[in-house]
Image (spheres, grey):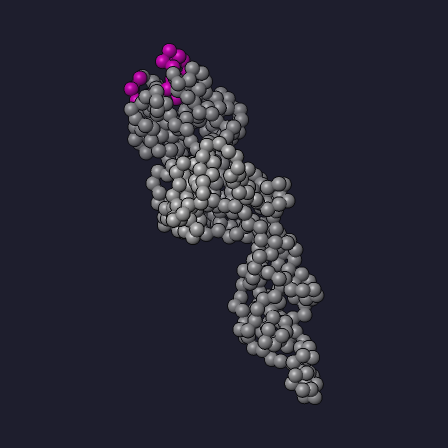
Amino acid sequence: MKYNYNAVYKKGNAGSRSIIGLLSLALLFFSVNLSAQDCVTGSDQVPLSGNAISNYTSGVFPDDVLFFEDFGNSPFPLTTENNFGRMTSPYMPENSFEFGIPYPNSNISEENDIENNYYAVVSPLYIRKGWNPNSLGWYFWTRDYEGIASHRPLVYDKSGEDSGAVMAINAGNVQAPFYQRDAQLQMGASYKVSLSWFVVNSPSQLAVDVLDKQSGDVLGTIKTGGIWGASSDWEETELYFNVPVETEACKIRDVVISFRNELQQHSGNDYYVDDLKVEKVQEAPLDAITLICPSPPLCSTSGVHSVNLNSLYSGTLPSDVVLRWFNTPNRTGSPVVNPNSVSTSGTYYAFFYSSSQDCYNTDNSTASVVVSIIAPCEDGGTTEPCTKPGNLNLGGDVTKVGISTLSTQTEGWPEMIHNGFLALESRDKGMVISRVSSSSVVLDPKEGMLVYDNADNCVKLYNGLEWKCIEKSCNE
Ligand SMILES: [Ca+2]
Ligand SMILES: [Ca+2]
């Protein structure tokens, strides 16, 4: 369809003009019912850009690299306090590989030895230090930095530094994920997943799943080749996937990219991974997979439960014209009262309306959008997220410290507020917390830290892993 708006108005047609001539101007204004096609010329339909779903907004993707992981460096010198250089990863999924606690911090040999289904982020040169020195029988990971004899050469991480860390994984019979991260994909784009892996004990095979964050659906899986003999050097692997172009039925944005063991085998299947990277690329090889579309979500945790119909208009409004929306193609019933915030699923039909001419561009609109409002997940998706005021009547310790701008404080303030440390009081002033250009400028943030992010216009909380806007949700 082409939409070509000349924004030319004409009033009436030849037939109606002959009637007009017999009528007074006032009568004309109130009684002549212009046919819709006479109201706006150039087109009879309103150009729209697709349908609307309440938990989806097209993203902005300034960075081509979604994430890169080199696992940093093991602490040095090696002590029992720092687990002999062994570290955990915040991206190890729950209920998957467990941290291989070294000896003597743990007396469990499976943990010390990073046995099947255990892992550690650690420099390969330091692994042996976590072994029980009286039980080195199963020690096979690599020669350690003290140079104890082994038939293997020293294995360094990808950085080549002594303390450069890898994720050491002892895979078993379960196709367990060992590293997974949230990411936002751009529809129609192509991505490259690259990783380096060193098979200490063969055989091994890895896979990467792309999961829909909302539904958990696996949208695509890409596998490395299998390695059937121990590596003599790092294996560099590049895997690719495409994201389908956006359609009314297919919207992908928030995903989880999950690296996992592909080979279901206890024996062998032990390896290091390093330099995991996911980045957008101009194009993928011809044999790259394309993600499938996720099933529609049953409920939404996005906090967005309405859509703006007017935002779907893709043209330039002719002068003197506003958009009006109806639930029927022939404008029966009343126009939608607040099209900027529609919270009821259904099909909505668009019309141009000229208030000065009091007419619509057509009697039968085929310009429609299907609105899908995804209920919030709280309470089975039946109610909006809630907030509740704190209970001030619980008793307990009083709040001893207060800062007030009032010349006369409220009687009993701040002791009347229970179990607090510090109370602030003002009739007309707010508390101002640190305002930063972006939360990313905060070096080494601490869990529980708060800032106001000027770029995202929200108060953000650092949860120990990432900064997140504080949003409306139930206090339970
Ligand atoms: Ca590394
Ligand atoms: Ca194994």
Numbered circles on residues, count: 0
**Above/below status of 235 relative to 125:** below
- The answer to whether residue 5 of the structure is visible from this angle is no
Instruction: Tell me residue 302's x, y (percent).
Output: 54, 46
Q: Which residues are magenta?
A: 130-148
Q: Position of residue 102 (x, y in %)?
A: 39, 20
Q: Residue at horizontal 39%, vertical 27%?
A: 87
Is 407 colored magenta in this rendering? Answer: no
Q: Residue at x 31, y 31 (%)?
A: 160
Question: Residue at the location (34% across, 40% down)?
Answer: 443
Residue in front for this viewpoint, 254 or 355 = 355
* Viewport quadrant of the N terminus: bottom right
Quarter of the image containing the C terminus?
top right
- Residue drawn where x is 61% and y is 48% of the image: 374
Residue 466: image x %, image y %?
43, 40
Residue 127 position (above or below residue 226) = above
